[in-house]
């Protein structure tokens, strides 16, 4: 049994659908007028990542129906969803499959949710074979078109995979070249691309992060758990965020961590407030740096992703944003 217990409310879904539609139609507003006419800070948009539910099914043998997740998002005050490929039913539709794209959008809008991002692998972006890299860029362009058709703000990229006979320096150079082209394509289409590196990847240090940022111009996805491990598992990932710059953040995958790897995999993700990372400081750095984007509840391989989502939502609310 999972912990989804919040009651459904069709009226609440309808209200949130209208709000979501108005926000989408109005674009990315930067300020909201307060009652007294002064400019009030924009509220951060909080989303649920389907990656936590996909990984929970795979790792713990649980079942999370998509309708249940979307109902939880609607009743819990969330704003959007980040999709993950091949879950729960097959891969992403083609960008020119209007019927499938419209159906996917309608499903989420019915629960008052915006599909704000899609996740993509990026191992082909640093393949030693130039033709493989060319095909990866072409595939990225198609997925960026899909993201735009779905109404997304972002496309997230994860450059996992091995070196495949090349040196790390060669891999970095090739990744930067592919990401530079992908970033240009995304901007032309009207979405913002972001990348995330992790401890098990061949790119797994603060220096790697900085070199990819500076070389490609692409922004990064801030995940405190990974930044914590990149900086010695001291519980202060916000310090790396400050060094890299809030203006370099595409969007946020918010989670806590205990500074270890989960079962030999990537950084251990735990509900905010149950690990050792100073998440309040991360939120303060984002706020003070002028961040106005999406914060996704990253519940990767958590035994109870609903608990993890609530913890992120509550932490953002406590921050005043």
Image (cartoon, rainbow, N blue to C red):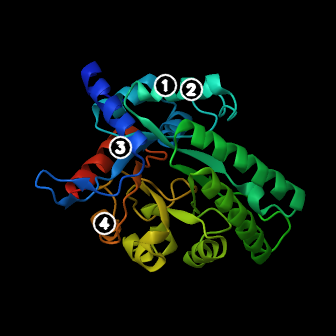
Give SS at disc 2. Answer: helix
Give SS at disc 3. Answer: helix
Q: Nearer the viewer, mark 1 or mark 3?
A: 1
Judged from this view, the residue extending furthest toward the front is 37
Is 98 drawn above or below residue 43 in the view shown? Answer: above
Q: What residue sits right under mark 4 in the picture? A: 287
Q: Quadrant of residue 181?
A: bottom right
Q: Is residue 3 visible?
A: no
Q: Circles 2 and 1: CB distance less than 8 Å? A: yes
Q: Is residue 133 visible?
A: yes
Is 169 drawn above or below residue 134 in the view shown? Answer: below
User: Which sits in the foreground, 106 or 309?
Assistant: 106
Q: What residue sits right under mark 1 in the picture? A: 106
Q: Nearer the viewer, mark 2 or mark 4?
A: 2
Which x, y percent locates residue 156? 57, 52
Please give the name of the residue rendered at 27% of the width and 64% of the height, measured from the top-left corner. 280
Q: What residue sits right under mark 3 in the picture? A: 309
Considering only order in the chain, which callout, 4 or 1, is on the residue closer to the N terminus? 1
- Mark 1 to mark 3 CA distance (whole Å): 23 Å
Which x, y percent locates residue 300? 48, 47
Q: Circles 4 and 3: CB distance less than 8 Å? A: no
Considering only order in the chain, which callout, 3 or 4, is on the residue closer to the N terminus? 4
- Mark 1 to mark 4 CA distance (whole Å): 32 Å
Q: Nearer the viewer, mark 1 or mark 4?
A: 1
Q: Tag on residue 102?
A: 2
User: Which sits in the foreground, 299 or 117?
Assistant: 117
């Amino acid at each position: 049994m999972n912990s989804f217990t919040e009651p459904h409310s069709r009226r609440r879904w309808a209200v949130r659908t209208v709000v979501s539609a108005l926000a989408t139609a109005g674009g990315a507003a930067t300020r909201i007028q307060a009652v007294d006419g002064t400019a009030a800070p924009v509220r951060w948009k909080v989303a649920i990542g389907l990656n936590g539910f996909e990984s929970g099914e795979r790792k713990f043998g649980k079942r999370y129906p998509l309708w249940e997740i979307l109902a939880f998002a609607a009743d819990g005050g969330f704003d959007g969803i980040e999709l993950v490929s091949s879950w729960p039913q097959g891969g992403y539709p083609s960008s020119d499959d209007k019927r499938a794209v419209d159906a996917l959008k309608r499903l989420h809008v019915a629960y008052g949710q915006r599909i704000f991002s899609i996740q993509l692998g990026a191992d082909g972006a640093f393949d030693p074979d130039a033709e493989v890299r060319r095909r990866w860029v072409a595939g990225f362009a198609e997925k960026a078109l899909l993201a735009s058709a779905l109404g997304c703000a972002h496309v997230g990229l994860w450059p996992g995979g091995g070196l495949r006979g090349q040196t790390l320096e060669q891999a970095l150079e090739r990744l930067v070249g592919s990401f530079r082209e992908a970033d240009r394509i995304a901007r032309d289409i009207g979405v913002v691309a972001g990348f995330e590196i992790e401890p098990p990847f061949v790119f797994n240090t603060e220096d790697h992060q900085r070199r990819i940022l500076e070389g490609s111009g692409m922004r990064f996805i801030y995940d405190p758990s990974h930044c914590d491990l990149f900086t010695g598992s001291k519980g202060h990932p916000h310090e790396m965020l400050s060094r890299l710059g809030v203006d370099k953040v595409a969007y946020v995958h918010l989670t806590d961590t205990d500074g270890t790897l989960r079962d030999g995999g990537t950084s251990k993700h735990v509900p905010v407030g149950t690990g050792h990372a100073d998440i309040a400081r991360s939120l303060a750095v984002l706020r003070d740096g002028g961040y106005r984007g999406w914060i996704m509840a990253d519940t990767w391989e958590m035994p109870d992703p609903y608990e993890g989502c609530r913890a992120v939502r509550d932490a953002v609310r406590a921050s005043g944003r």
